[in-house]
Amino acid sequence: MRLGVPMGDLAGSMWAVVGILAALYHRNITGQGQLVDIALLDSLVSLITYPALYYSYGREVAKPLGSGHQAIAPFQVFKTKDYYLAVACPREKFWVLLCEALEVPELISDPRFLTMGNRLKNKEELYGILNPIFSQKTNREWEEILVKAGVPCAPVNTIDKVFADPAIQHRGMVISIDHLGEELRFFGNPIKMSETPITEYHSPPRIGADNRQVLADLLGYGPEEVERLKKEKII
């Protein structure tokens, strides 16, 4: 069974960090501690931004969009000859540049696509025109053409390509450690700090490997007490 990214867990963890830091700052000023209450559901709901505003303002209920955007067109993933490419035209100038790069300048003055509102209204017709065009070249070919033209775009990468991405490598995001005799590669901390940089990553310990240290250093248990817990198979 393959699982997707656990967005609730990740969002809840990040909001928890923000809440804890805010509570610590408050404690440092006032000397008063407090409970930090974080729910995964609350964390997910907090990420629903403009769809909530659209509903609140105009009672517009968001519908499934696939890779598309609720307020911008074109702004989605297109199937190319070999994979998928994300293309974004958030402003009129990018729409013009895209049409020129795709060699369909007639779409610029087409009444159906003249404005963002027109393109949203007629996006099915628009994508019916653009999809066959994108299918004629590979991701790399289209990326070179669109980047040169100044159109925002990016390939949809498989995980192996994410690890090999030059930008990810340059940012030091790919970390390699020894884990129980095997190399483990994963992504590092995205927070880069000038005065306290993270320069070391360590493999997690085996289950129970730090029991004695935790019980002695943090809880103040003596050697005899730790040994008793071990004999009674509590640890």
Image (cartoon, rainbow, N blue to C red):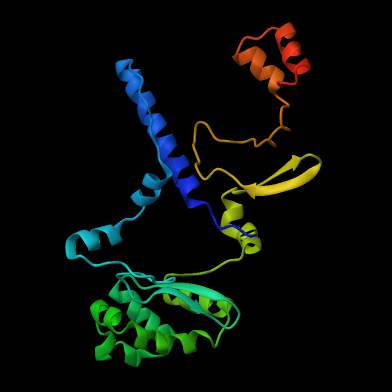
Q: Is residue 46 above or below residue 54?
A: above
Vertical order, 65 against 230 (above or below): below
Left or right of 172 in this view: 146:
left
**Visible in this render: residue 151?**
no
Please name the residue shown 54% across and 88% down the image: 136
User: Does 233 sit left or right of 47 as displayed?
Assistant: right
Q: Residue at x 72, y 15 (%)?
A: 229
Asked whether, in this view, residue 15 is left or right of residue 201, the answer is left
Residue depicted at 50% across the width and 31% down the height: 195
- Name the one closer to the observer, 26 or 33: 33
| Outermost residue toward the front in this view | 232
Left or right: residue 39 compared with residue 29: right
**Residue farthest to the right, as pictured:** 181
- What is the tally of numbered marks visible in this picture? 0
**Quadrant position of residue 3:** bottom right
Residue 21 placement (x, y as % from top left) = 40, 30
Residue 48 or 162: which is nearer the viewer?
48
Q: What percent of the width, then of the height, locates residue 35?
A: 37, 26
Residue furthest out toward the left: 57
Q: Is 122 in front, or is 90?
A: 122
Residue 33 placement (x, y as % from top left): 36, 20
Residue 94, placed above or below residue 215? below
Specify the quadrant that holds the C terminus.
top right
Name the residue rendered at 49%, 36% in the picture.
Answer: 194
Q: Quadrant of the N terminus?
A: bottom right
Residue 28 at least partly seen? yes
Give the answer, above or below, for where 220 lies relative to 208: above
